[in-house]
Image: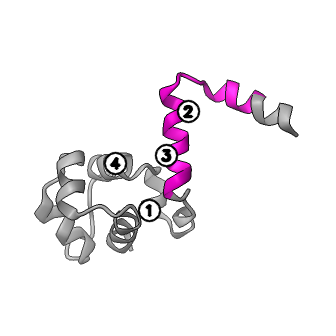
């Protein structure tokens, strides 16, 4: 269920409900209800906001196979790479050169 995945991913990132709420702009009570599966039909907009903060695609919340996400260290490395202005194409070229 979506709520279980939100809670699991949030906890993996050592993030509180309050922190996720503040960063995503989704009410803390709504996230709590979602995680307890009291709210079972969130809008795509809400899922997009939550997914963005968790560093995942919305699919990871909707579909069980989406639970295979990068660990926290890989997420930080990818954010550093993006912060340096390295494009996806440049990363692909780098990977190809290393093979």
Q: Position of residue 67 (x, y in %)?
A: 52, 66
Neighbour class for label 4 at 10 Å: few (<14), some, many (≥20)?
some
Residue wearing tag 4: 53
Q: Residue at x 26, y 76 (%)?
A: 37
Colour mapping used in the image? one colour
Label 4 – label 3 distance at C-alpha = 13 Å
Q: Which residue is mark 2?
A: 81
Residue 30 sits inside the magenta stretch: no
Name the disc covering residue 41, or none: none
**Relative to residue 27, is residue 78 depicted above or below?**
above
Q: Which tag, 4 or 1, sits closer to the chain's start?
A: 4
Residues drawn in magenta: 72-93
Question: Is residue 34 found left or right of 87 in the rendered image?
Answer: left
Instruction: Tell me, for residue 62, which label it has, or none.
Output: 1
Please name the predominant secondary structure of the magenta segment in the image. Answer: helix
Per the image, the residue denoted by label 3 is 76
Mark 1 and mark 3 lie on one chain; the one further toward the N terminus is 1
- Element under disc 2: helix
Please identify the quarter of the rendering in which residue 94 is found: top right
Residue 46 as seen in the image, left or right of residue 33: right
Secondary structure under tag 1 reads helix
Q: Position of residue 34 (x, y in %)?
A: 24, 69
In the picture, measured across the screen, residue 29 lies left or right of residue 82, that is left
- Cα separation between marks 4 and 1: 16 Å
Do the numbered discs 4 and 1 sit on residues whose CB atoms are within 8 Å? no
Measure the C-alpha gap from mark 2 to mark 3: 9 Å
Secondary element at tag 3:
helix
Q: Residue 3 appears in which quarter of the rendering? A: bottom left
Residue drawn 55% across and 40% down?
78
Quadrant including the N terminus? bottom left
CA–CA distance in space, label 4 to label 2: 17 Å
Q: Residue at x 57, y 67 (%)?
A: 65
């Amino acid at each position: 269920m979506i709520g279980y995945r939100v809670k699991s991913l949030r906890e993996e990132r050592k993030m509180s409900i309050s922190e996720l709420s503040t960063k995503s702009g989704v009410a803390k009570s709504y996230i709590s209800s979602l995680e307890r599966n009291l709210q079972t039909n969130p809008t795509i907009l809400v899922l997009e906001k939550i997914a963005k903060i968790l560093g995942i695609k919305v699919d990871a919340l909707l579909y069980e196979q989406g639970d295979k996400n990068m660990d926290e260290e890989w997420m930080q490395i990818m954010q550093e790479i993006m912060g340096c202005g390295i494009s996806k194409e440049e990363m692909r070229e780098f990977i190809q050169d290393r093979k």
